[in-house]
Every structure is written in structure tokens, then in C-alpha cells.
Image: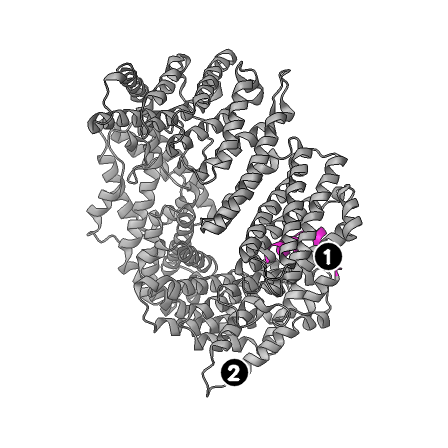
């Protein structure tokens, strides 16, 4: 049955769905009933079953799996990956109602759980999970209440005796079952269940025990926290007069979570166990759930946090002030404080989910103060020692504070009263100043921790993105310090001693600095060039080393090049205004710094650690983001920049083509750089700031040189690699799209091998699964074949002026190449026509346009395909099919104008609708038809 659910890669999605739907409607329910009847027999004869007998055990296992697969069936075709969302409703068909209204079906699986041994019992729980998730509309209100009551009673029974929950699989499935109770039913409905008070008490007790057993099935805690999060979030909407009792049990859950994390730390440190804090994704997920749960009885949560934090912080302060203190004790307290800081951060950000009172604002202020005091203590120790995990927790906390206190309303909150008393932070401006001091401290002392530097720079980046924050940040002394002292002396991670992985952070750093600088820069060139002073000094030093032809630079020069390229790319990213961007370009161009980067690529073309940052820098420089390069017709900047970018592509291309690269290193060593070269050329030509006709007019071979080297780079790529690497295929087809739109004459002028390669790649692209590639290929093909058609029309035209109807020698060669490789274009026509005839026709508008031109070019071949398709139909349908093909070309003229293509697109839509609705007795595929005619030489029609 599994094969029915899984897609057959050789069938279209719609055909797969038709097969699955047919199976669902005709056989699936009977299969489910059969499996249930077999399970009833097994339950009733359980005393006679011998689970030690592998054959009997395997039989029961297969029946249980069959039942589970029936319930997990993709009933409406909406789930492509059952692991993507664990809270999906099960869209059981209405015809299945009798099985679910019969409460013996539920009882069956609860009974089986009690009877079956470990290893099989979890399957019965999995079936219950799916049944709990059945769509609400399957039942009436009364039926749903009765169904839910039996579910909760069954769960309560399991919680009472805890049968089988020592098995990890049973435990995990049972936690999933608890989570599904709230995901599919409202809190008011749960409260109405008679045994709800007993059930919620047992669930709370089970949750507390589970949290303390943190080493046992840790991934299952997610489902328990999900249950409590959803219940607490539903409290404001409950209208039931009965008490929900969450105020009684939620504090117990919070207390268990906090104390279990704190108690686990000494065991983890002393026994060298796996630390949950190493899995930050899991920690953040749990904290998001906790942030909602904590807000129920918030005063109890805050009191508990204050009590634990004060105790641990006091002990930690005494330890660090004690000479020769035990390092293990210090580590234990640091990790315990790490958990408390994370949990306090989640409590603070929980304000977003509920209305807050003045009393809660005051409690938030108490929590914030304690973390900031701890931060001051740990910062004072940084020159000697520090705890990376604690620092990451503090950065997470500061990010939560940033989110909470960056609005005008937050400034009026009582939280600032206590902050003013203790730290003198009376408003957001002063709080931002405090955060920025912490950012500077981290950048100064944590240069060797990539994780901390990255998180710190992400915090700075988040602060600099929003206008209100930037407006306030730009006035801070701390920010002005960063803008004038961004050197390795103050920020060690900017030095050449950093590892290559650490240097990736530099782009983010300079992007943030760029945003802060641009805020009120205006046209102040002096201030901009003063900001660039550290980079200027690095370029001057690097230039003396790299431009010396008699010496080969060392690793320090290499790292300096990498760092500068990353810095400049980060700085160029936020320069969206033409005035500021022009300042940057003039600084780079007129001070001869760009040749230094070109020289570096020439020296280290074999090393992607150097070439990739430089190539990416140029890809950003030539990107006409927000028209920053366009608009000034009196400036030669666009042409000058294009010439430098072309030099880079030529230098890199010539060197990389000579490089022998192992197959397993092909992408990072070669293809990645080639993809960025394609991106550079696409950004340059697609930015509409370079008049390409100027180069030929004035005898400049820049454009011809870069196109020639790009053609060689294209030919160096194996066709199979194009679609194997997504970034490469995206860059390649985007470049072709750009060239075919505005520079199709240059494509026509390529050497024959390159043009044939492009046609072959389009053939592959038309069969790609990626819709973006498919649409790009259709657009490219349309431009190319339209150009061919126009050139052929020109060849046979009767214009009075001979010069108007004459073809250049290059175009004559181009048409000759097209004629010699017409089978490629014909195969694409066959592919497009086949697409029309199949049920999975992707983007009719895009594919119809090249199809029309191909039909006009190869009328004889089209006629043969048409006849083959018609003859493949039953005799009684052949006349109808022939009429549809005639209607397809109704009103179509022999030209490639937009109006004519639009008319053909409308005809395609009608034709496809008729063909798809016709009952099919035979396939419409043109593939066989094409094979039959490949050996026939069809001439081009004009």
C-alpha cells in the first residue's frame, strides 16, 4: 500500500494523484476495515498468541503497519512530506464515518496497547495519534464530544497505570498523542470532558516526571511542551464555566523545567555527558514554547526565576573572586546561569503573546536587571576568562530585549523605572547604548569564537536594519567609535590572524557599518573617505606586495586580500543611493585599487578562498541595485566598471581553464567560480547602464573578449553538471536569458560549438523539474528562434534597398549552423508539443511562444508530428483531433509579432482543454513520433 502513496517519478503529479484517488475511493476503506477485523481477531485471541514466535509477531506487525498506513494516507494530495508538519489534520473521507462513530474502533487500539509487547504496542499508539487528528467536520458536535471523551478516558487510563511507558517508542508515541489532543480539539471541549480534572492532573504529573528524566527520549519533550503551550494560549478564548485548572498545574511544569535543567548541569560536566545546550535549535524551540507557558501565573514564574538566579549568581560571584577556585564548580555555575538567562529571555519575549500589566512590567524589570548585572560581572572577567555558552545566552537575551523595548509603547513601561534606578537606563536610547557597548566588548574579546562573533554581528545587523533603530543608533558615541576605529587593533577578528571561516563575519560587520554610515551621510565626501581610511591603509600595504612582479606574496597578503574583498562587499550592499555608491566606485577606481584585486585573482586563481570573495565583490559592484548605477548619462562609470569586471572574468577564466581539477572538488574549485562569473556578466548586461554598441563603434574589444571567454567557460562544463548544481544552473540560464533578450546577436556570433552546446542545454532545461529553469529555457528559446525567423525573412525579403535585405557574413554562418543542427530545434518542438498534450502542462504562456515560432520554421516536421498523433487515435476520433489541430493555427499569421503569439497562446489554451477532456484510449506522447522522423531532413520554412 505504501507504493500507492509514494510518487512515481515517471508519471506526472496529476496522474499520480488520479491513481491514488482511485485507490482511495475504491479500495482503501475496505483495506482499513479488513486490517481492523484482523486486529480484532488478534485481540480476542491474545491468550493464544505467542509473541516469541517471530512469524506471529511479524504478522501482527504487518497488520498494524497496514492500519497505520491506511490512516496516514494522503487523502487530499496536500502532504508531500509527512515529516514536514506533525500537526496536520487527517482528512478522512465522509464514507469512513461509520468506522469512527463506532467507539469500539477506538477501544480496539487502546486494548491492543495493553495487550501487545514492546516493539508492537507503539504501532497501536501511532494509529491512535492519527485517529485523534481526524478532521473535526467528520463529526457533529455531540459525536465529537463522545469521541473525545473516550479518547481522554483512554489516555487517563494509560497515565494511571503508566503501562508500557518505560519503552522509548511507546513513550514517544504517547507524547505525540497528548499533543494531538490539543492540536485538534479546543480547550473548552477538553474541559467539558467529565474526567478532565483527573486527566489534567495526571498529564501535569507525567510532564513533571518526563522533564526530570531529561536523558530518556529528550526529543519527546517537544510534544509535551507543545500541549501546554497550546492550552495556555487558548485560555483567553475559553467560555466554559468549568475551571481549566491550568493556573494550578502550569507553575509545576515551569518549576520542573527550570529545576531539571539546573540539576542536569553537574552530571553533564562531571560525567562528560552530551550537553543539551550544544543543540541551540532545540533550545530555542523549547524556549519559544516556554515563553507562552510562563505567562500563566507569571508572578510565580518570576519569583522562582529570581530565587534561583540570585542564589546561583551569588555563588558564582563568590567563586570567581576566590583564588584557586575549582574550575569545575565555576563551569557548573556558568552553565546553570546560561539556562537561567535563556529562560529569562523567553519570559521577557512572552510579553508579545499576552496583554501585560504594570505589575508584570515591574517583574520584567527585575529580571532584566539581574541579567545585566551578571553581564557586567562576566565582561569584567573577559580579559582573563569567559564562558562561550553563557555569552551566547546573553546575546539571545539582548535580542529579546531589543524586540520588546524598541517601540514607543515600551518606553512608557514600568520596566524602565528599575533600569533607571540601577543602571541609569531611562529610555530606549540609553538601552541601545548599553547593548552597543556589549557588542563592542564581544567584538574586542571574542575574536576567536566564530559563533559569538556571528551572533554579535547578527544582533548589530538587526539593530541597523530598522529605520527607528538606525536613527537612534547613529547618534550614539559607541556607534561613532565603530565607524572611526574599525581596525584589527580594536576588533581582532578584522586581522589577518583570523581563520578563513571567521573572516566570513566581516561582510556582515561592514554591511551594518554601511547602514549606520549612510543614514545621514548625504554628499559628505570627506566623512566617507575618512571612514574608508583603515581600508585605504590596507590597500596601500597590500598593493606594495602584490604589484611587485619580482616576489610571490605570502599567506598574510592572501588573507588581507580575502578580508578586503569581504569588507568591501559588505560595504557595497547597503549603498543603494547613486551618490554614495559613486563615492565608493571613484575611491576604488581612481586610486587604482581594482588592479590589486585583479592581480590577486591572477596569482591565486587556483584557490577559491581568494577568488570567491573577489568574484562576489565584483558581482555586487556591477549589480544595479535600486538603479544606483543608472541615470547619469554624463558619467562613464558604467562603462569603466564593466571593463574592470570583464578583465576579472577574462583573467579568472583563462587561468581556471588551464587548471586540472579532481572530480570530487569540481564544484568548489571550478564550477562555483564560473557560476559567479556568469552572475557578474548577467548583472552587468542586465543593469541597463552599459551601452554595448559603444565598444564596437570605438574598436574596443572588451565585450568580445569577455563573451569569448564566457563561451569557453560554458563549453568546459559538462551538460550533466548544469542541472546537478542548482546555483550553477540558475546562473547559467539567467545569463542566457539576459543575452537572448538584449544581446541575441552576440549569441548568434558565437562559435558553432558554443551555440550547439546552448541548444543542447535548452533541450535539457525543458525537461528539468525546476519550473524556474523550464520558464527561462522557454523564454531563451523564444528569443533565439524568433531571431532565426527574422534573419531568414530578411534573407528572402524584397526590400528595394539591397543593404536592408543583406545579411552579414556572421549571420550567414549562424544560419548555416542552425540548418546543420535543426534536429535539436525539432526535438524541442516535439518536447513542447508533448507538454501541451500531457496533463501536467507547465506555464502555457511561456511554452506557447517558442512553439509557434518552431512550427513556422519547421512546418513539414510539425505536419508529420500532427499526422502521427492523429493516426494514433481511434478511427472515430481522428476527425475530431484533426479539426482541433486545424483550429490551433486558426487566425495565425506568418510572423513572430507579440500580437500573433498572444493569439496562438489563446488557441493553445482551447486546444489543450479539448485534448485533456477527451477520454483517452491512447497516449498522446510525441516522443515516438519524433524518433520516427529524426532521420528525415526537414527544411526550414519561411
Residue stretch rendered in magenta on the structure: 457-476
Of callouts 2 and 1, the N-terminal one: 1
Q: Is residue 287 above or below residue 497?
A: above
Main SS, magenta residues: helix
State the count of labels: 2
Q: Position of residue 854 (x, y in %)?
A: 34, 49
Q: Is residue 547 above or below residue 359?
A: below
Q: Nearer the viewer, residue 730 or 528?
A: 528
Q: Which residue is mark 2?
A: 545
* Residue in the picture at 46% in, 70% down: 610
Residue 472 appears in the figure = yes
Residue 700 appears in the figure = no
Q: Residues within 10 Å of mark 2 (few under 14, many from 20)?
A: some
Left or right: 257 as drawn, with respect to 102: right
The stretch drawn in magenta includes residue 166:
no
From this viewpoint, which residue is outermost toward the bottom?
A: 550
Q: Is residue 202 above or below residue 847?
A: above
* Residue in the picture at 64% in, 50% down: 315
Amino acid at each position: 500500500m505504501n507504493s500507492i502513496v509514494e510518487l512515481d517519478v515517471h508519471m506526472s503529479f496529476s496522474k499520480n494523484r488520479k491513481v491514488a484517488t482511485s485507490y482511495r475511493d475504491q479500495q482503501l476503506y475496505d483495506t482499513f476495515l479488513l486490517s481492523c477485523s484482523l486486529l480484532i481477531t488478534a485481540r480476542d485471541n491474545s491468550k493464544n498468541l505467542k509473541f516469541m514466535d517471530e512469524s506471529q509477531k511479524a504478522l501482527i506487525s504487518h497488520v498494524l503497519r497496514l492500519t497505520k498506513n491506511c490512516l496516514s494516507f494522503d487523502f487530499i494530495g496536500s502532504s508531500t512530506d509527512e515529516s514536514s508538519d506533525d500537526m496536520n489534520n487527517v482528512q478522512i473521507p465522509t464514507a469512513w464515518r461509520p468506522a469512527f462513530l463506532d467507539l469500539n474502533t477506538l477501544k480496539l487500539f487502546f486494548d491492543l496497547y495493553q495487550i501487545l509487547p514492546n516493539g508492537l504496542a507503539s504501532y497501536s499508539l501511532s494509529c491512535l495519534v492519527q485517529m485523534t487528528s481526524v478532521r473535526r467536520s467528520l463529526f457533529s458536535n455531540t459525536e465529537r464530544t463522545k469521541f473525545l471523551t473516550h479518547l481522554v478516558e483512554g489516555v487517563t487510563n494509560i497515565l494511571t497505570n503508566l503501562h508500557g511507558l518505560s519503552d522509548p517508542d511507546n513513550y514517544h508515541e504517547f507524547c505525540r498523542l497528548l499533543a494531538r489532543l490539543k492540536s485538534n480539539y479546543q480547550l473548552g471541549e477538553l474541559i467539558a470532558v467529565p474526567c478532565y480534572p483527573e486527566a489534567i492532573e495526571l498529564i501535569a504529573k507525567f510532564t513533571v516526571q518526563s522533564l526530570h528524566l531529561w536523558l530518556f527520549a529528550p526529543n519527546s519533550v517537544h510534544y509535551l511542551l507543545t500541549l501546554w503551550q497550546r492550552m495556555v494560549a487558548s485560555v483567553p478564548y475559553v467560555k466554559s464555566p468549568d475551571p481549566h485548572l491550568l493556573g494550578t498545574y502550569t507553575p509545576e511544569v515551569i518549576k520542573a523545567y527550570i529545576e531539571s535543567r539546573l540539576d542536569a548541569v553537574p552530571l553533564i560536566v562531571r560525567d562528560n555527558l552530551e550537553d543539551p545546550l550544544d543543540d541551540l535549535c532545540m533550545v530555542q524551540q523549547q524556549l519559544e514554547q516556554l515563553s507562552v507557558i510562563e505567562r500563566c501565573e507569571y508572578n510565580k514564574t518570576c519569583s522562582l526565576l529570581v530565587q534561583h538566579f540570585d542564589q546561583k549568581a551569588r555563588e558564582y560571584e563568590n567563586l570567581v573572586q576566590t583564588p584557586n577556585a575549582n574550575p569545575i564548580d565555576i563551569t557548573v555555575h556558568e552553565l546553570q546561569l546560561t539556562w537561567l538567562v535563556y529562560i529569562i529571555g523567553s519570559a521577557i519575549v512572552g510579553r508579545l503573546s499576552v496583554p501585560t500589566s504594570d505589575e508584570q512590567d515591574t517583574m520584567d524589570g527585575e529580571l532584566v536587571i539581574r541579567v545585566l548585572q551578571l553581564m557586567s560581572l562576566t565582561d569584567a572577567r573577559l580579559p582573563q576568562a569567559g564562558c562561550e555558552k553563557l555569552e551566547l545566552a546573553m546575546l539571545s537575551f539582548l535580542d529579546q530585549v531589543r524586540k520588546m523595548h524598541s517601540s514607543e509603547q515600551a518606553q512608557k513601561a514600568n520596566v524602565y523605572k528599575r533600569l533607571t534606578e540601577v543602571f541609569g537606563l531611562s529610555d530606549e536610547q540609553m538601552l541601545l547604548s548599553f547593548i552597543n557597548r556589549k557588542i563592542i566588548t564581544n567584538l574586542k574579546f571574542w575574536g576567536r569564537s566564530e559563533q559569538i562573533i556571528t551572533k554579535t554581528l547578527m544582533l548589530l545587523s538587526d539593530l541597523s536594519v530598522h529605520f527607528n533603530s538606525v536613527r537612534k543608533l547613529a547618534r550614539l558615541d559607541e556607534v561613532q567609535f565603530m565607524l572611526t576605529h574599525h581596525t584589527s587593533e580594536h576588533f581582532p577578528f578584522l586581522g589577518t590572524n583570523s581563520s578563513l571561516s571567521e573572516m566570513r563575519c566581516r561582510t556582515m560587520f561592514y554591511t551594518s557599518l554601511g547602514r549606520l554610515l549612510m543614514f545621514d551621510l548625504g554628499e559628505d565626501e570627506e566623512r566617507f573617505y575618512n571612514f574608508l581610511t583603515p581600508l585605504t591603509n590596507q590597500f596601500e600595504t597590500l598593493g606594495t606586495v602584490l604589484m611587485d612582479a619580482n616576489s610571490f606574496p605570502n599567506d598574510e597578503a592572501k588573507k588581507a586580500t580575502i578580508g578586503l574583498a569581504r569588507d568591501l562587499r559588505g560595504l557595497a550592499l547597503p549603498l543603494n543611493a547613486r551618490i554614495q555608491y559613486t563615492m565608493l566606485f571613484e575611491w576604488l577606481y581612481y586610486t587604482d585599487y581594482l588592479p590589486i584585486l585583479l592581480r590577486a585573482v591572477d596569482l591565486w586563481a587556483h584557490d577559491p578562498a581568494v577568488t570567491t570573495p573577489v568574484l562576489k565583490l565584483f558581482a555586487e559592484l556591477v549589480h544595479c541595485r535600486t538603479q544606483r548605477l543608472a541615470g547619469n548619462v554624463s558619467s562613464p562609470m558604467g562603462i569603466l566598471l564593466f571593463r574592470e569586471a570583464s578583465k576579472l572574468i577574462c583573467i579568472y577564466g583563462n587561468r581556471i581553464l588551464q587548471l586540472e581539477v579532481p572530480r570530487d572538488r569540481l564544484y568548489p574549485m571550478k564550477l562555483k567560480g564560473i557560476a559567479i562569473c556568469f552572475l557578474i556578466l548577467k548583472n552587468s548586461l542586465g543593469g541597463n547602464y552599459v551601452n554595448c554598441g559603444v565598444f564596437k563603434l570605438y574598436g574596443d574589444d572588451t565585450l568580445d573578449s569577455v563573451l569569448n571567454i564566457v563561451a569557453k567557460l560554458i563549453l568546459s562544463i559538462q551538460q550533466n553538471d548544469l542541472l546537478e548544481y542548482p546555483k550553477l544552473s540558475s546562473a547559467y540560464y539567467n545569463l542566457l536569458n539576459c543575452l537572448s533578450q538584449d544581446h541575441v546577436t552576440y549569441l548568434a556570433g558565437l562559435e558553432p560549438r558554443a551555440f550547439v552546446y546552448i541548444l543542447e542545454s535548452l533541450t535539457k532545461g525543458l525537461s528539468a523539474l525546476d519550473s524556474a529553469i523550464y520558464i527561462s529555457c522557454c523564454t531563451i528559446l523564444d528569443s533565439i528562434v524568433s531571431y532565426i525567423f527574422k534573419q531568414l525573412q530578411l534573407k528572402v525579403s524584397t526590400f528595394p534597398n539591397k543593404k536592408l535585405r543583406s545579411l552579414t557574413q556572421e549571420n550567414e554562418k549562424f544560419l548555416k549552423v542552425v540548418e546543420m543542427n535543426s534536429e535539436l530545434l525539432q526535438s524541442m518542438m516535439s518536447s513542447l508539443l508533448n507538454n501541451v498534450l500531457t496533463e501536467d502542462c507547465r506555464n502555457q504562456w511561456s511554452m506557447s511562444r517558442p512553439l509557434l515560432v518552431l512550427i513556422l520554421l519547421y512546418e513539414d516536421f510539425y505536419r508529420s508530428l500532427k499526422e502521427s498523433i492523429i493516426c494514433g487515435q481511434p478511427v472515430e476520433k481522428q476527425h475530431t483531433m484533426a479539426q482541433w489541430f486545424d483550429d490551433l493555427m486558426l487566425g495565425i499569421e506568418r510572423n513572430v509579432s507579440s500580437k500573433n503569439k498572444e493569439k496562438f497562446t489563446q488557441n493553445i489554451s482551447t486546444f489543450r482543454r479539448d485534448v485533456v477532456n477527451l477520454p483517452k484510449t491512447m497516449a498522446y506522447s510525441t516522443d515516438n513520433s519524433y524518433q520516427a522522423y529524426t532521420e528525415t531532413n526537414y527544411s526550414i520554412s519561411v
